[in-house]
Image: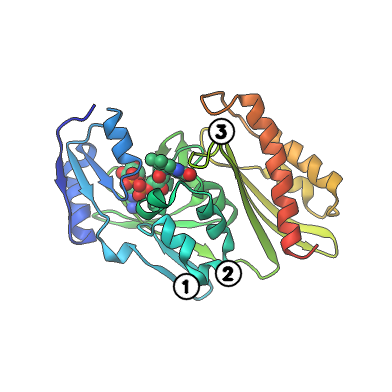
Amino acid sequence: MWSNFEYIKPRTLGEALDLLSKYKKEAITYAGGTDVLVGMREGEIKPKYVIDIKGLPELNKIKSKNGHWSLGTLVTWSALMNSGTLKKRLPIFNEAAGVFGSPQIRNKATIGGNICTASPSCDLGPVLLVLDAELLVAGKRRKRTIPITKFFLKRKQTSLAKDEILTEIIVKLPPRDMAMAFLKHRRTGVDLAIVNVAVAVRAKKNKFESVKIALGGVAPTPIRAVKAEEELKGMECTDENIERAAQVASGETKPISDVRASAEYRKELAKVLVTRAIKSALQKMGG
Ligand SMILES: Cc1cc2nc3c(=O)[nH]c(=O)nc-3n(C[C@H](O)[C@H](O)[C@H](O)COP(=O)(O)OP(=O)(O)OC[C@H]3O[C@@H](n4cnc5c(N)ncnc54)[C@H](O)[C@@H]3O)c2cc1C
């Protein structure tokens, strides 16, 4: 059920921050609108002021500098999918974008909006967790950096203040011997994940040097499976070791049953997807 609201389109980041600081809880930041509009239509959110930041050009760029990538938070999923340079050095973004929504949704939806919604199954969450991303945030009076591990607080809640805007996602260029994979299982072609998994693997001489594992859809927020990561450190890259670690990862999840799947199914799926994702990363290394 729609309620009345005023739509405002600021021309600069400063203007947008002034508006958010003025209207605070009465305002909502609007990027691609693919979550906001659904929430407003369902009557779950009833903002008095909708602040449309989509036109701010400074938040719309993908840049690489000094071994870091900066992804503007207004970058759309289509832009992420089509970025040739990103595809070469960080193909995991392309993999995630390839199974995100539909072309229409990808053309509108932004990467910043995806993590700010903080849905437990948001596709970017696990990817940023294995990349140890840092998030740059602007407020009217100060700027700050939030590590991705401190960003998701609970279901649909982040550590962003009401009058702050997420401006950039920073990821370090991974070492060349690190391989990554993203896998997602969903009910239909266009759907949120029942479970999604991202992994970043380093291995030498058939032994795991380090493995990062993150999952979505299995807890109130996207999570890192740290016990499973520990389990694999220094171990041989065998099917048996991978499957045992995947079982540990599944044990670290706390899923719920909902319209998409039962908790039991999610636990089983977590195990299967972690196993497949690690094997897929190893295959990319040629092993
Ligand atoms: C049909 C359909 C299919 C979908 N498929 C998927 C899918 O496959 N995977 C998936 O993960 N999601 C999916 N979604 C959910 C949604 O599209 C994504 O979460 C999307 O990335 C949200 O981006 P947006 O720009 O549209 O955000 P908006 O709707 O504009 O905003 C979302 C939230 O983030 C806040 N926000 C946005 N940008 C900023 C910012 N820069 N700083 C601070 N706060 C901000 C807003 O205030 C709001 O609370 C789907 C949605 C639909 C309708």
Q: Regarding mark 1 in the picture, which secondary structure is present there? A: strand
Instruction: Specify the label residue 89 is tagged with.
Output: 2
Q: Amino acid at mark 3?
A: Ala
Q: Give the mark count.
A: 3
Looking at the image, which residue is at 84% across and 47% down?
Answer: 239
Q: Choose mark 2 or mark 3, whichever is in front.
A: 2
Looking at the image, which residue is at 32% across and 50% down?
Answer: 32
The quadrant in which the C terminus is found is bottom right
Instruction: Specify the label residue 219 is tagged with.
Output: 3
Q: Quick check: 46 above or below 29?
A: above
Q: Choose mark 2 or mark 1, whichever is in front.
A: 2
Looking at the image, which residue is at 50% across and 37% down?
Answer: 120
Q: Amino acid at mark 1?
A: Ser
Looking at the image, which residue is at 46% across and 61% down?
Answer: 80
Q: Earlier in the sequence, mark 2 or mark 3?
A: 2
Q: Regarding mark 3 in the picture, which secondary structure is present there? A: loop
Separation (CA) of disc 2 from disc 3: 30 Å
Residue 123, given in percent of the width and then of the height, sits at 51, 46
Instruction: Specify the label residue 64 is tagged with.
Output: 1
Q: Earlier in the sequence, mark 1 or mark 3?
A: 1
The quadrant in which the N terminus is found is top left
Q: Nearer the viewer, residue 23 or 1?
A: 1
Q: Quadrant of residue 63?
A: bottom left
Dot 2: few (<14), some (14–19), or many (≥20) neighbours within 10 Å? some
Residue 107, given in percent of the width and then of the height, sits at 37, 55
Q: Amino acid at mark 2?
A: Arg
